[in-house]
Image (spheres, rainbow, N blue to C red):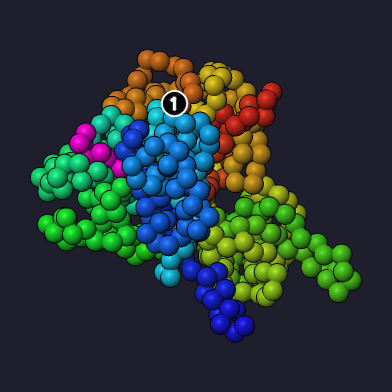
Amino acid sequence: MTETKDFQRGYLNMELLRFTTAGSVDDGKSTLIGRLLYDSKAIFEDQMEAIERASEQKGDEHVNLALLTDGLRAEREQGITIDVAYRYFATPKRKFIIADTPGHVQYTRNMVTGASTANVAIILVDARNGVLEQTIRHGYIASLLRIPHAIVCVNKMDLVGYSEKVFLDIQKKFKELSMKLDIQDFRFIPISALKGDNVVERSENMDWYDGPTLMYLLENIYISSDLNYVDGRFPVQYVVRPQAEKFHDYRGYAGRIASGTFEPGDRVAVLPSGFTSTIKSVDTMKKSLEQAFAPQSVVLTLEDDIDISRGDMIVKENKMPEISQDIEMMVCWLSETPMVMNGKYSLKHTTSDAKCIIKDLPFKININTLEKNYEDKSLSLNEIGRIRIRTTKPLYYDPYRRNRVTGSIILIDEATNNTVGAGMIV
């Protein structure tokens, strides 16, 4: 029993890494994830038996590991990824959440959704085809979403005779492309997802490559500094007022820390009122903490009695966010209904709701060439552009490049309540 509790405690305290896969059609994204799960012993026997049967029915020569993630019937029939498939697994070093995203251009919105919270982007390149337009698109989206780390996996090396020259040529071309992208950490690995080369186990076919395997990199890449621990931001989700008599004086503010750290004694300001106070305690269900940090969910209590409600934000007094009703942001349009210039939309920003008008579209991006189009003032499904909005009340935010939580906005169609845009404040 003690060993079980120790294991559970260790598992809960393990660091979580979220990563997404991106690549052109048939580059082998789903096969790579299947290989990661299979070689790391993260597949149950019944799952393995099911994909063996499915592979046999399809007439595949090998067990089709892509079927582990291609869960929709349409995906299995067409052999492509349509929806974002999430998979969870763990090794002795880390827990992982994988987002397997589609490669087709018409599913750009799915990729944006799946990659929005990732620490690492795995970008696949077919060794036979090299860097394509789709590769540029995937690199740009990873850069737009400020994914801190990118691992470029040159896949299907078995089909080019495990050629070092092919790998180095692709690496050189991608490095030239990366000069236009805002990703700080690029890594390159030659792999064969089908054969398992350099995925979990080192390849005996590429002795010229002396770098890490993909699994080693995922287990050891440093992500602790990816979060913003400087700017204290605490969007309030709920006001805690227990009904029990012994807690009649208790008033706390529950939420998830967006960035920074909070501890008793910190001087804070409450937005939008601007009133200041001192943190009295940082509480969880079980105990009070000496310090809490992003992305923990906690309850803050203050020394002063201030009127605070959902949508307000508690911030460090000496690290204030920007406050404005005029916002400029990059947006990926998610709706089949095109954007309406001067149209009215609802928006969600952290825990706050507001309404806005789209005032201007300075330019849109051709995400296959990275060129800017200053003439076209329309934005349709899967297109990305820069827009200016005017909100009905001030938002308190940070630029997305500084804070992915307080720098993101969701646009909503008031008539249908559908999410139509994912925005990143610039």
- Residue closest to the far bottom: 2
Residue 360 shows in this picture: no
* Front-lying residue, 210 or 133: 210
Q: Position of residue 395 (x, y in %)?
A: 58, 41
For disc 1, the marked residue is 106
Where residue 413 sits, quadrant-wise, is: top right
Q: In x, y percent, where is residue 161?
A: 14, 45
In this rendered view, identify the residue nearer to me: 94 or 175. 94
Q: Quadrant of residue 8?
A: bottom right
- Viewer-proximal residue among 245 and 188: 188
Q: The magenta stretch spans which residues?
A: 122-130
Which residue is at 47% across, 45% downward? Answer: 53
| Amino acid tagged 1 | Gln
The quadrant of the picture occupied by the N terminus is bottom right
Left or right of 424: which side holds 290? right
Q: Residue at x 26, y 44 (%)?
A: 155
Residue 89 lies left or right of residue 201; in this view the side is right
Q: Position of residue 263 (x, y in %)?
A: 58, 70
